[in-house]
Image (tube, helix red, strand yellow):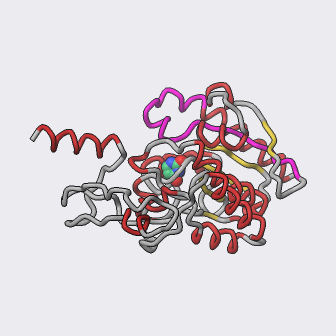
Amino acid sequence: MREEAALLQWYIDAGVDEAIEDSPRNYFASIQAEPQLPASMPAPKTPASVEFKQASTPAALPLHHSLAAAIAEARKLADAADSLQALEKAVREFEGCAIKRTATNTVFCDGNPASRFMLIGEAPGAQEDAQGIPFCGPSGQLLDKMLAAIGHNRTNSYITNTLFWRPPGNRQPNPEELAICQPFVQKHIALVDPVLLVLVGGTAAKAILGTEQGITRLRGKNYTYRTPYSDKEYPVAIVYHPSYLLRQPAQKRATWQDLLAIKSLLSSFER
Ligand code: URA
């Protein structure tokens, strides 16, 4: 019994938080079939009641043996995408980011790209993964209220994330995952060509601005961002992530100031 409890704890630590099917599915089987991997690689022992979430992609995924290869492939695909539709297709078909295997959906965007008011969050959570829509869970409801406070909604703003798949167990994106998705994010920004880019939360701010500074220092100031896919300098604002605000409501006051600054920036661009 103690062993079973330890095994369950190991699954929880690894981010397995849902039982999906009655019997286990061995995702390592297709990997074992690949010539590059040692034939002796053991299949994991999985109790019938616990299993990684079923991937929405075919079982035989090509495996990226090096981070550099995955980034290079993402870069090639991002280079070639000449429209948002083409970029979305490339992201959906991309197999180089391992978290896609445990995700139910690719979460690409929501809202109206023609608004050119672009928000980038961290990564899909459980509800976003289930529905394939960014910010549709509890933090999304608060984000909608934040947008409404400055006269915005999903018809006049455009929302995406730094990662297109849910990290298992809602853990934070790791640097490798962010690096793999970066070419897509860079192209995404160039294709939307935003009048203002709002980075939602510390992970998006650090990943996109390439800084180690924390969100508390970053928010409340104006920045610019350059993507390799455009000659423009995009104005950037940073706000606390709504999931942080749900845990720390006292920070809503500072966020209100940030939202007013965003509103005033947006109206200065309209003039
Ligand atoms: N948190 C994010 O950063 N993005 C989402 O889409 C949902 C929650």
User: Residue 55: x, y in percent?
Assistant: 41, 66
Please tell me which residue is depicted at 41% across the width and 50% down the height of the picture: 168
Is 241 within the magenta? yes
Depicted 160 relative to depicted 2: above or below: below
Please say if 111 is above or below 11: below
Query: Picture coordinates of residue 266 (x, y %)?
Result: 77, 48
Q: x, y percentage for residue 26?
A: 32, 65
Q: Who's the residue at 75% across and 43% down the image?
A: 236
Q: Locate the N terminus and report the quarter of the image it occupies.
A: top left
Q: Position of residue 206 (x, y in %)?
A: 66, 37
Residue 193 location, quadrant: bottom right
Q: Nearer the viewer, residue 220 or 70?
A: 70
Residue 135 higher or lower than 238, as above or below: below
Q: Nearer the viewer, residue 138 or 36?
A: 36
Q: Nearer the viewer, residue 33 or 56?
A: 33
Q: Is residue 267 magenta?
A: no
Q: To which quarter of the image does residue 203 belong?
A: top right
Numbered range of the magenta stretch: 232-254
Q: Residue at x 90, y 54 (%)?
A: 231
Query: Among all residues in the image, which is located at the extreme right?
Result: 231
The residue lying toward the viewer, choosing from 104 and 116, is 104
Instruction: State how many labels appear.
Output: 0
In the image, taking residue 9 as reference, residue 66 lies left or right, namely right
Q: Is 268 on the left-hand or right-hand side of 91?
A: right
